[in-house]
Amino acid sequence: MNGVAPGRAARLTVRGVVRRFGGIAAVDGVDLVAPPGRITALIGPNGAGKSTLFDCLSGTARPDEGRVLLGGRDITRLPEHVRARLGLARTFQRIAVFPTLTVAENVRVGAERAGGGGSRGSFGYERDGLRTERALALLGLTAVAERPAAGLPTGTLRMLELARALAGAPRVLLLDEPSVGLDAAETVRLAAVLRALAADGLALLLVEHDTELVAELADAVYAMAAGRVVACGPAARVLADPRVGLTWGVAADDG
Amino acid sequence: MADGASLSLTVDLALAGLTVGSAAALSGIGLVVTHRATGVLNLAQGAQAMATAYLLRELVVVQHWPTALAAAFCLLVAAPALGLLLDALVFRPLQRRGAGPAETMVACLGVFVLLIGTVVLLWGTAPLADAPSLVPATPITLPGGHLLRLDTAVQLGVVLGLALLVGAVTRFTGFGARLRAVVDNRRLAELAGVDADRVSAAGWAFGSFTAGLVGVLLAPFLLLDPYGLPLLVMETMAVAVVARLRSLPVAVVTGLALGIAQSELTRLRPGGQLLPLVQSVQVNLFVVALLVAALWGAGRTVGDGGPQAVPGGGRPAASLAGQAARAAGTVLLLLPLGFQGDDLRRALLVPALALVLLSVVVVTGYGGQISLGQAGYAGLGSLGTALLISGRIPGIPALPPVAALLVAVLVTAPLGLLTGWPAIRRSGLALALVTFAVGTAMSRFVFEQPYATNGLTLDRPAFLAGDRAFYTAELLLLGAGLLLVRKLHGGRLGRALTAMRDHQAGAAAAGVDVPRLKLLAFTAGAGLAALGGGLMGLAGRAFDASAFDPVQGLVWFATVVVVGADSAVGAVLAAALLVGLDAGTAPGISAVVVGALAMALGRMPGGLAGVARRAVRWGEPRPVPVPAERLSPAGVRTRERLAERLSGRRRDGVVRR
Amino acid sequence: MTVEAELRGVRVRYGPVEALHGVDLAFPAGRVTLLLGRNGSGRTSALHVLAGVVRPSAGRVLWRGTEVGGLDAHRRARLGLALVPAERAVFGSLTVAENLRLAVSGPQADAVVELFPELAALLGRQAGTLSGGQQQLVAVTRALLGRPRLLLLDEPDRGLAPAVAARLHGILLDSVREGRTVVIAAQSLPRLPVADCLVHVLHRGRVVLSGEPAELGELSAMGEMGEMGETPPPIAGRSTSGGGPGALGGPPERDQAEHAHRGDHGGGEQEGR
């Protein structure tokens, strides 16, 4: 694990983020902190604003108000690739891999775009190769390294996506429903990997529908409804919070 | 009095403009209806129009059929049948496979190129002036003494009638309700038992019918040739784009308005330098409209959903197929060194064309960005070289040919931003429209101007005057181009480009600077195309605007995609085959081959190169199979108990509250 | 017991994501089958594969004993299969009457009014302007009017007022009595007053349980659900059970107990697979 997430821990801080679509605030003043070494989860029913908030964090959307800080640096207005180079990695609900590249090349794209400037030259070349190999080994992909990514099973692709994110030596990892498409055994494995990453000092923020996985993994949970955080705190407490259950029920009635 | 005369002129010009306007409106109706019923923007409409017009002329002028019978056959039988055939053979298989707009667009271009090739093969490229008109041009006198031609009146009537008919059928019939259901939500319509394929088939038949109608109505006004008419009809896509591919009334009004505006613009006659510009805007108003419509607003109306990039065939491994292709390419390129006279002169085109095709490989194959405008950059390279050699650029002395070519390439490369910039926020069909519009605008506003057609010299330097020497120089430049392309495809940059092509959002999330990479691809593409174009000019010792016709750009694009968009060697082979096929057999054959293959692309992902790669991989070890389903121990137990229960003692389960 | 429809070893894949990892599901004729599982469990994919909306990447789809995997959705619809999807279940740009007329030709106003009188006043409205519950009613009615022999409903209770949901359940049971087969997919057990129904529970794209409703309770009491890493779908306390995962409805103590339990057995599960 050493070297994949070197000791430059950083927290992701969200302050008063608002994102509107035609006058309606999909995210309505959210504050959130994802500290290093912890797994933070974001839950809520469909339409609660989780995805929109996630987009604001990863850079695919710009918030109308509020700030997003990565280790104290304001990244609110930075484009996605710059955030990635600063150490903010993400995965996609519909797994994003490059099907015509091999597994190793996929990971290498992540390694080569890692921040720190000196990626060029033979030193950078060697370092990128090393990072690629480490990430492949960490996620058990060494055996399939030379296979094209197209056509691999979902579980392997999920690990590949994670490996690419880790190869970039991120400080914060955003995960958009990482358990989608995984069966129970694969989910167990995913959970183990995520826990190990957090233990290594990475800050993890996951959006997840699966409350069971959230309960098992998350150190802190933020529950959203109608664009706002309605409860936050330790997983057990938030999941048991009657207000959370209530808002979910109301949202379901709204249809 | 003067006001009266002015008003009268305005009315007369408006009436004259109705001819073009109603044809454009008709084309718009066809595009909108086809798109609504099938989800496809029929880029091949212009070629369908042209083919129908040629068929009508053949039947009337050559076979001496009565005009009415021939027209009825062409419009009511041949054109709809073509539409149904295209649906069944090309578009339905794509729809079934869930192909994205990019693939469908390539298939449309395939149809386009195939039809053009077929017409060239059957009737040649010489323009024909004797296209029969269905309605005589008898002038009708309107109140106020204005004259309206009968054919224009009929055309206008057809447009309005057709629009009303389509509206009525959609609103009031069962078929219309099914059509609207399919437009609303295709999947749900199928679940409701609606045969969406039949609705699509009807859409294609109708679209093909209107295309044919546009063709036979427009043909008498122009010289019938395989390139002009399709291009003209493609320009009227502006009408459908303004209508957001949805609204019939908007399409009709836009078409008529543009026609009238074009006619009224003839009154503007500013003096001096501005005159040629105003005249070109007037003549090419539809191109301007297409450019504007494509740049503003087309992003959201067209090309959403589905994979947007042209599917690549995978990165070529150092495989047997690759080696064989490289060997074949080398032999084909060296062969002409032994040629003489005309053969050698024709072969001069091959390396030049290969460079232009390589530009498509870079932009579309590697970068995944659709660019239909590469012919424009090639033309800029050619024209720039000619202007520089002739010393026609103010402030710059006449340059020697080699320096002129170099400067032309260096100046054209950054112009790649003209299409690269729009590509940052666009993809798929929207990008295709923009790049096509830019290419067409270059052709119309830059190449087909008096300064470009008169008195340009494009002489080779003395040491390259001989064809063999020039061909050798071309090979060296092609080699340099291939090295550049290889640099772009290999290593860090190549991986980043492939990542961007495969999954743009994923690439950005992995830290790839996607906008910069797009600009880089378009810049490199423009430079390569300019080099190829410049060499084409030097090879023929003249700047030929028609060599860089936008339709030519479509043929080149289709060729590269057919061969395998991300295969550089394939592009070289394709150049040799394009030139060789037409020179060795009959003109048009290459287009027929390319078109047919492009239509079949849905069945061979990755083009010919992809097919070759898969054929070679056949012998390699198969991938490890995905592990089979396993039931958890509790699941197994449950299943056993369930089987027990179902086989014997049934008892009523009680549902708990 | 005759089987109306069956999935055998079916896998469904959407691009990189596999939603069903090879499932065997049987739907007995003339009965209600409940397909339970929370979001992402694959229940919607199972319905879609049965209706022909998606093609399985592996496995067989049998309907009345014949392989129908290659049959288009509209053909299956015409042969008597109806699916009411959970989302976008009506044609928003068509009027309610047009929506209903797509199912069957001829005037059906009487039948509609008989089923759901509240729709009578809405016939001329554009379906897209209706509330979520009203749209759901239109979608269900359209499916029922076609008198299908196999009716698939994805979260039919969603957005319906309890009274309307109860009426819908009554109508569904009536149609089962007429010999139809009904499959209902839901997050948790709907409050369906039916004795004789089969329950399949899906979890992460696999079948973890097939049995009768009462067995859900039995199994969890035996602790087997915990071992499977599955929270038993709670019996819905309210009719409007859609939306959130069922686990939230349960008492918090149980949630925590579950986790503790699973922590012990986490490794065991992996071995078992």
Image (cartoon, coloured by chain):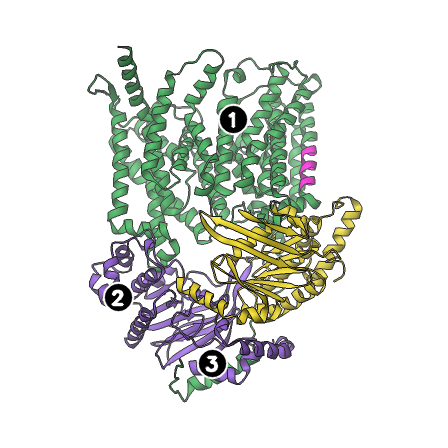
Residue at the far bottom: name it.
B649
Distance (Cα) linking label 1 and label 3: 71 Å
Read off the residue under disc 1.
Answer: B442
Q: Which residue is located at x 38 percent, y 20 percent?
A: B265
Main structural element of the magenta stretch: helix, strand or loop? helix
* Residue A201 percent location from the top left of the image: 71, 61
Q: Nearer the viewer, mark 1 or mark 3?
A: 3
Q: Residue drawn at (27%, 35%), measured in percent from left and top? A: B72
What colour is chain A? yellow
* Three-letter amino acid code of the residue under disc 2: Phe
The chain that appears purple in the image is C
The image quarter in which residue B629 lies: bottom right
Q: Nearer the viewer, residue A191 or A74?
A: A74
Q: Are marks 2 and 3 in contact (CB under 8 Å)?
A: no
Residue highlighted by disc 2 = C116
> Which residue is the site of mark 3?
C216
